[in-house]
Image: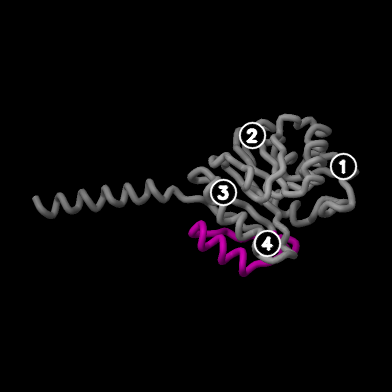
Amino acid sequence: MITDTINGIGLHLHTEKSLFSPKHIDKGTLAMLSNVDLQGGQKILDLGCGYGVIGIYAAHFAGAENVTMADVNSVAVAFAKKNAAYNGMQDISVFQSDGFSHVTERDFDLILSNPPYHADFGVPKRFIEEGFHHLKAGGRMVMVTKRYAWYKNKLQSVFGGVKVVEEGGYYIFISQKREVRRMRKERKSELSRKLRRKYR
């Protein structure tokens, strides 16, 4: 079992050797959590949750009923459920999903992910492209990896912008879903007013 404290929050986590970072909380995860603004009532998705560090930590701020954890690995899901209950967060929704295949909600405030950065970019590509459509307007996707250029370019192309924070050899990428439709509508309305004035 891992027993650790993150920013004052004590966590007790059961793991096993087949899971990612089974002996200690991954440093990339710690770097990401130190750069995320978590607030009460936020609807949060821990995508690729592993044994549940991110989602269980986030539930201390947002409320367990507002947190969803998903992973493609059935063993990870089993441990995430066990750890959620062990840490008093039974109301977290935990289920198996290949990326967003079983994620139906499309109004998350935050999607947090520490993707498999040692593999090819197929998985993070899907996470980013589909993640955009599962965020509410103004919602943010936050990812942490050791790779820089590909993630920066991909998030920039999908979201139209990305903030990058470097910490301890890791890069934390923060992208926000802009309220595009509203902005276009306001711009169209502004142009219409100008045309009306022009032809008076």
Tag 4 residue? 171
Disc 4 and disc 1 in contact, CB within 8 angstroms: no
Q: Earlier in the sequence, mark 3 or mark 4?
A: 3
Identify the residue at image location x=67%, y=39%.
68
Q: Residues within 10 Å of mark 4 (few under 14, many from 20)?
A: many
Q: Earlier in the sequence, mark 2 or mark 1?
A: 1
Q: Which mark is residue 66?
A: 2
**Secondary structure of the residue carrying numbered label 3:** strand
Identify the residue at image location x=73%, y=64%.
119
- Residue 128's x, y, as percent? 59, 56
Magenta-colored stretch includes residue 57: no
Mark 3 → mark 1, Cα distance in angstroms: 29 Å
Q: Is residue 4 visible?
A: yes
Q: Quadrant of residue 102?
A: top right
- Residue 149's x, y, as percent? 62, 69
Image quadrant where one finds the N terminus: top right
Q: Is residue 23 visible?
A: no
Mark 4 → mark 1, Cα distance in angstroms: 27 Å
Name, please, the residue furthest toward the bottom.
149
Residue span colored magenta = 145-170
Q: Which mark is residue 14?
A: 1
